[in-house]
Amino acid sequence: MAPSAVRIGRAAQERECMVVRKTKKMLDVEKRIRRPLERAIPEMLNEEGFTETAKQLKLPKPTLTYWMLKLGIEMRRVALAPGEEIEIKRSNI
């Protein structure tokens, strides 16, 4: 399986200036996991993968996809040749 890189995209950076209205379900999940979704989802996706993240958040996969879109979280797959490495750099938003 190729590694995935998840980051908060330009759309999310622009949304930082404006408030993203979160649904009651989003707020309930944040309360349960004790972290903001904008930080938790990318971390979980990088560590666990898409399906496992949806399971841990107790969400259907289409809902997780919608939340990622709404929060401006991008997911990209990268294929690496033997011996190649990937580095994820976090920007300070």
Image (cartoon, grey):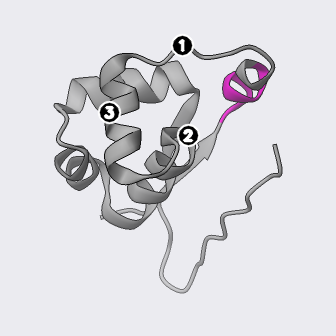
Structural crowding at the residue carrying mark 2, measured as other residues with C-alpha within 10 Å and reported as few (<14), some (14–19) or many (≥20): some
Q: Is residue 52 above or below residue 20?
A: below
User: How far across and how far down the image is residue 74, in percent?
Assistant: 54, 36
Question: Upstream in the sequence, badge 2 or badge 3?
Answer: 3
Residue located 27% across and 24% down the image = 63
The kind of residue on which mark 2 rests is Glu
In the rendered image, which residue does mark 2 sit on?
38
- Asked if 77 appears above or below 63 in the picture, the reply is below
Lower sequence index among marks 1 and 2 = 1
Comparing labels 1 and 2, the label whose residue is closer to the camera: 1
- Of callouts 3 and 1, the N-terminal one: 1
Look at 38% across and 62% down and name the residue there.
2
Q: Label for residue 21?
A: 1
Q: Are marks 2 and 3 in contact (CB under 8 Å)?
A: no
Residue type (three-letter) at the residue carrying disc 3: Asp
- Give whichever of 25, 89 is nearer the camera: 25
As measured in the structure, the alpha-carbon distance from the residue carrying label 2 to the one carrying label 3 is 14 Å
- C-alpha separation, residue under disc 1 versus residue under disc 2: 13 Å
Over which residues does the magenta segment extend? 9-14
Q: Is residue 5 magenta?
A: no
Mark 3 → mark 1, Cα distance in angstroms: 14 Å
Give the SS element for disc 1.
loop
The quadrant holding residue 86 is bottom right
Q: Nearer the viewer, mark 2 or mark 3?
A: 3
Residue at the image point whose x is 37% and y is 28% from the top: 26
Left or right of 41 on screen, residue 29: left
Q: Position of residue 15 (x, y in %)?
A: 71, 19
